[in-house]
Amino acid sequence: MRSEMSDADLLAAHVAGDPEAFGVLVARHRDRLWAVALRTCGDPETAADGLQDALVAAFRRAGSFRGDAAVTTWLHRVVVNACLDRLRAAQVRRAEPLPEDLDDLAEVRRGPRATPAHAVDPAERTVAEEQRARVQEALAELPPAQRAAVVLVDMEGYPVAEVAQILDCAEGTVKSRCSRARARLAVLLADVLDVSDEPVPASAAVPQVVGNPATDPLVSGMATRGPPPASPPTFD
């Protein structure tokens, strides 16, 4: 069954002409890819467009995958590059702000499929929503390269070595970008994180995600427009 195939086997099957293999591969990792796209772009519309660009590119260029990295690393590289291309294209425009109405934001975040296991204190939820919104706004203030590095390392929990592969740069460059991003975020989020002089990683305000989550990542609920469908794109 395709669901039991490895990522590499699914990609190879897609290249060989299997019409369903790519959809299975995307469905397996779409939540994580969407979280990275949204946090990198800082805007749901731009993130959705960037992710769609990436999936189309991956669908078309799967035959160029050399197998010198994990398939997930390759997919994340395609997604990050597509999102950075979108950001560069829109460099003259500021990202659209997140909704200011926290009640609306919470309702969007919960979504139709959310099934909380226990009741959450409304005051605590409001504070958490406000903090996450502030973190996303602070991320939007970072240069795209720093934002991509800190999102992948501090928020998505990838090792520096793998992030270097995703971003196609040296490990030292990843560490340097993360360091500068953390320092900037510590200033922008000082009142939220209650810090003094020590830089605090963005992960202090946004939970890390380790592995592909079984449920929708919390950040994805910020968007009224979610990730593109898991099925492969079609072309004329």
Image (cartoon, rainbow, N blue to C red):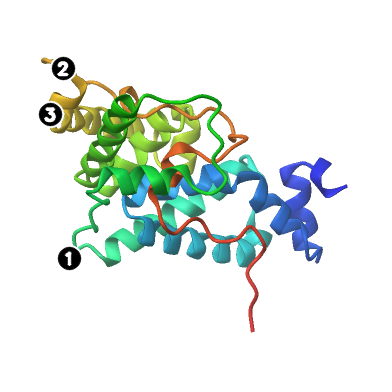
Secondary structure of the residue carrying numbered label 2: loop
Q: Which residue corresponds to the image point at 63% horizontal and 40% vertical from the top-left?
A: 70
The three-letter amino acid code for the residue at tag 2 is: Val
Residue wearing tag 3:
187
Residue 24 visible somewhere in the drawing: yes
Q: Residues within 10 Å of mark 3 (few under 14, many from 20)?
A: some
The three-letter amino acid code for the residue at tag 1 is: Val
Which quadrant of the structure image shows residue 12? bottom right
Mark 1 touching mark 2, by CB under 8 A?
no
Q: Which mark is residue 195?
A: 2
Query: Which tag is nearer the camera, tag 1 or tag 2?
Result: 2
Secondary structure of the residue carrying numbered label 3: helix
Secondary structure of the residue carrying numbered label 1: loop
Earlier in the chain: of badge 2 and badge 3, it is 3
Residue 168 visible somewhere in the drawing: no
Give percent across and percent down for residue 224. Answer: 41, 57
Earlier in the chain: of badge 3 and badge 1, it is 1
Q: Which residue corresponds to the image point at 51% horizontal and 56% vertical from the top-left?
A: 227
Q: Is residue 88 left or right of residue 5?
A: left
Earlier in the chain: of badge 1 and badge 2, it is 1
Which quadrant of the structure image shows residue 62? bottom right
Quadrant, the C terminus: bottom right
Alpha carbon distance from label 3 to label 1: 24 Å
Alpha carbon distance from label 2 to label 3: 9 Å
The three-letter amino acid code for the residue at tag 3 is: Val
Residue wearing tag 1:
92
